Image: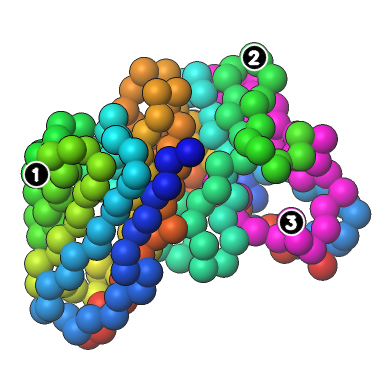
Amino acid sequence: TQLLEQSPQFLSIQEGENLTVYCNSSSVFSSLQWYRQEPGEGPVLLVTVVTGGEVKKLKRLTFQFGDARKDSSLHITAAQPGDTGLYLCAPRSNDYKLSFGAGTTVTVRA
Amino acid sequence: GAVVSQHPSWVICKSGTSVKIECRSLDFQATTMFWYRQFPKQSLMLMATSNEGSKATYEQGVEKDKFLINHASLTLSTLTVTSAHPEDSSFYICSPGVAGGYEQYFGPGTRLTVT
C-alpha cells in the first residue's frame, strides 16, 4: 500500500506572501497530479507531472517532481485570496485510479 | 476542459429512503467512471470504479448493495444510495475518464444530507 502524506495540513498566510505545499510517498509515482478544490465544488486539475526532476509553471504556481519520483511540491508566489482552497496531490496508478492525499487547506487573507 | 454535470447538486432525505445521483459527461464519452465520497474537512475517498456496460468494482469497505452504480452509457452514470442513514451524509463526486488518458474530470459534486 502506498503511503501518501501531504504537509502542512493547514496554512494561513497574508496576501503577497509565498507558500509551499509538499506531497511525499514511500513509493515511486508513475505520474502525479495536483488539484485545487473550493468549498462545495469538485476538484480542478492544476497540473500533471510525469518525469523525475520535472518543473512546471502555471502563472504564480510552480510544481516540482522529485528526481526519484517519490515527492512533489507546489509553490505559490505572491499568494492572492483567490488561491484559497484545498490543494490535493494525487498519484495515478496503472489502472488510472487516483488516490488523493489528505490535502492542504490554504487560506490567503486579504 | 471537459464539462461534467451532477444532479442534484444537493439533496436532503429521510433515513431509510433511497437517493439517486446522476453524473453526465456533456461533451465527451467516458469509458470509465469513478465515484468518490468526501466527508467534511477530509479528502476524497474512492468508492468504486465502473466501465461502461460492466459491473462496478468497489473499494474495500464500500458496500456494493448499499451504493448501486449504473454506467449504462458513455455519457451517464448513476449512484443510488439505498436505505440511506445519517452516516451516509457526505459530498459525492463523480469523475468520468477516458481509458488511457491523463485527463480526469470531476463533477461539481452532490451534497447529501440524511436526516
Q: Name the mark on residue A55.
A: 1
Residue in the picture at 17% in, 81% down: A15
Does residue A56 appear to the left or right of B22 in the view shown?
Answer: left
- The extreme right residue here reads B16
Which residue position holds label 2?
Answer: B53
Label 1: element kind: strand
Indicate the amino acid at tag 2.
Answer: Gly
Q: Which mark, by number, is residue B88? A: 3
Marks 3 and 1: in contact by CB < 8 Å? no
Percent across and percent down for residue A21 are 24, 62
Vertical placement of residue A24 versus B86, above or below: above
Q: Position of residue A20 (x, y in %)?
A: 19, 65
Between circles 2 and 3, the one closer to the viewer is 3
Q: Report the residue at 22% width, 49% height from top.
A: A72
Q: Secondary structure at mark 2?
A: loop
Q: Magenta segment: does it hold B6?
A: no
Q: Quadrant of residue A102?
A: bottom left
- Residue A49 position in % (x across, y down): 20, 37
Residue at mark 2 shares a chain with residue at mark 3: yes
Residues marked 2 and 3 touching at CB (< 8 Å): no
Within-10-Å neighbours for mark 1: few <14, some 14–19, many 20+: some
Q: Nearer the viewer, residue B83 or A23?
A: A23
Q: Nearer the viewer, residue A98 or B25?
A: A98
Decide which of A64, B40 is in the foreground and name it.
A64
- Chain assignment, label 3: B
Q: Are marks 2 and 1 in contact (CB under 8 Å)?
A: no
Residue range (magenta): B65-93
Task: Kindly tell me whether residue A71 is visible in this rendering.
Answer: yes
Residue B90 colored in magenta in the image: yes
Q: What's under tag 3, amino acid-wise?
A: Asp
The part of the image, by quadrant, that contains residue B82 is: top right
